[in-house]
Image (spheres, helix red, strand yellow):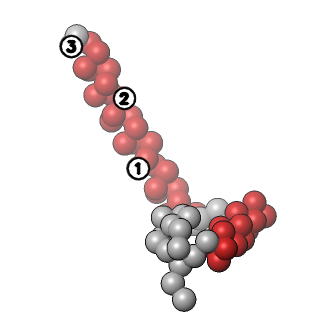
Amino acid sequence: MSGALFQRAVDVLEHRLILMRMRMFDWLHGPEPETPADRQREHERHRLRRAFPKIDIDGQGPLRK
């Protein structure tokens, strides 16, 4: 039982260390450039929001005019 608890604690610490390193990397190098798939996804999201203005498509709330 204590071995499993210790392993879980090590996993949590390792996860936090990895997140910290990733944040530092992003801070130093900036965000990744936008890809064609990102632009297409944003275009489709915008089309859906215009087609269904009363429905919360992407968690930003209904479209307001």
Looking at numbered disc 2 in the image, what kind of residue is underneath it?
Asp
Q: Going by the image, does 9 lie left or right of 64?
A: left
Instruction: Count neighbours of disc 3 (C-alpha within 10 A) and say few if under 14, some if 14 to 19, many if 20 or more.
Output: few
Residue under the image location 75 percent in, 60 percent down: 37
Q: Going by the image, does 45 lie left or right of 35?
A: left
Circle 3/circle 1 CB separation < 8 Å: no
Q: Can you identify the residue that label 3 sits on?
A: 2
Q: Nearer the viewer, mark 1 or mark 2?
A: 2
Measure the alpha-carbon separation of dots 1 and 2. 14 Å
> Is the residue 27 above or below the residue 11 in the image?
below
Element assignment for label 2: helix
Residue under the image location 26 percent in, 12 percent down: 3
- Quarter assignment of residue 39: bottom right
Q: Nearer the viewer, mark 3 or mark 1?
A: 3
Image quarter hosting the C terminus? bottom right
Looking at numbered disc 3 in the image, what kind of residue is underneath it?
Ser
Residue 13 at least partly seen: yes
Q: Can you identify the residue that label 2 sits on?
A: 11
> Is the residue 31 above or below the residue 46 in the image?
above
Instruction: Count neighbours of disc 1 (C-alpha within 10 A) and say few if under 14, some if 14 to 19, many if 20 or more.
Output: few
Q: Going by the image, does 56 lie left or right of 45?
A: left
Residue under the image location 29 percent in, 15 percent down: 4
Q: Position of residue 22 (x, y in %)?
A: 49, 51
Residue at the limit of the structure toward the bottom, as seen here: 65
Q: How many numbered badges does the structure rendering display?
A: 3
- Quarter assignment of residue 35: bottom right
Earlier along the polypeptide chain: callout 1 or callout 2? 2
Q: Position of residue 38 (x, y in %)?
A: 70, 63
Residue under the image location 57 percent in, 76 percent down: 53
> Which mark, residue 55?
none
Q: Position of residue 5 (x, y in %)?
A: 25, 20
> Which mark, residue 20?
1
